[in-house]
């Protein structure tokens, strides 16, 4: 009888216990705490708000240049959404120079300063239309974000500012 109990105990430990631990782990895991796909998109604002430092770390991995150009409503590149999310979570923004000649519209919306620095993207608010900077400026801006994160990302006081209109 003791041997039989021992075998039953072993079976319970090997098969049943891991299954119940898994079930309890699933119960404890809240849906709003799971890392969402496409972390940069606005549908993930609640996750950003609940986990700002983690969100920034994940968004930093997503940063890649987008194709230069003019984009209309509903067609904004993913990289633009990443910059928007980073700006809202950190309060930071960066600009960089481009070696390429800007069109008249790019000059208007990418806001070059007297040193030729432009922003990653510029928005025509009333049209929900954006212009994405040339690739060299985008790459430099992404490098600035990564450098900022490397130096200050671990100690920065992240605050998801709901009043901040991160779209523009």
Image (cartoon, rainbow, N blue to C red):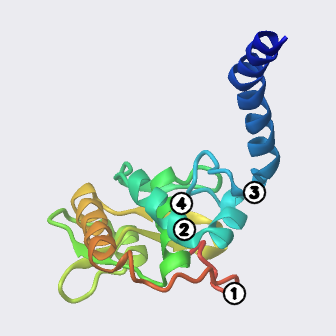
Query: Element under label 2?
Result: helix
- The tag earlier along the polypeptide, 3 or 1, is 3
- The tag earlier along the polypeptide, 1 or 2, is 2
Q: Is residue 162 above or below residue 147?
A: below
Instruction: Give 91 or 74, whichever is nearer the viewer.
Output: 91
Left or right of 166? Residue 145 is: left
Which circle, 4 or 3, is nearer the viewer? 3
Q: Residues within 10 Å of mark 2 (few under 14, many from 20)?
A: many
Query: Element under label 3?
Result: helix
- Residue at which label 2 appears: 85
Residue at 72% over, 66% down: 46
| Mark 2 and mark 4 residues within 8 Å of each other at the beta carbon | yes
The residue sitting at the left extreme is: 99
Residue 145 location, x and y as percent? 32, 70
- Residue at which label 1 appears: 163
Residue at 57% over, 71% down: 52
Q: Quadrant of residue 10?
A: top right
- Point out the image quarter for the N terminus: top right
Residue 22 seen in this snapshot: yes
- Residue at which label 3 appears: 32
Q: Quadrant of residue 63?
A: bottom left
- The tag earlier along the polypeptide, 4 or 3, is 3
Query: Element under label 1?
Result: loop
- The tag earlier along the polypeptide, 4 or 1, is 4
Residue 77 location, x and y as percent? 50, 51
Instruction: Give 94 or 25, whichever is nearer the viewer.
Output: 25
Q: Quadrant of residue 119?
A: bottom left
Residue 41 location, x and y as percent? 61, 56
| Mark 4 and mark 1 residues within 8 Å of each other at the beta carbon | no
- Point out the image quarter for the C terminus: bottom right
Q: Which mark is residue 81?
A: 4
| Mark 2 and mark 3 residues within 8 Å of each other at the beta carbon | no
């Amino acid at each position: 009888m003791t041997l039989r109990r021992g075998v039953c105990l072993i079976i319970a430990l090997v098969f049943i216990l891991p299954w119940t631990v898994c079930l309890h782990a699933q119960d404890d895991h809240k849906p709003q705490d799971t890392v969402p796909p496409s972390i940069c998109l606005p549908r993930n604002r609640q996750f950003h708000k609940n986990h700002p430092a983690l969100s920034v770390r994940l968004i930093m991995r997503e940063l890649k240049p987008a194709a230069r150009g003019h984009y209309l409503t509903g067609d904004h590149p993913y990289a633009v959404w990443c910059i928007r999310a980073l700006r809202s979570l950190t309060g930071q923004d960066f600009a960089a120079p481009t070696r390429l000649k800007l069109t008249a519209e790019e000059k208007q919306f990418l806001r070059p300063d007297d040193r030729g620095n432009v922003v990653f993207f510029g928005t025509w608010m009333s049209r929900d239309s954006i212009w994405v900077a040339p690739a060299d400026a985008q790459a430099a801006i992404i490098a600035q974000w990564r450098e900022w994160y490397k130096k200050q990302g671990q100690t920065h006081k992240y605050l998801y500012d709901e009043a901040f209109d991160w779209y523009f």
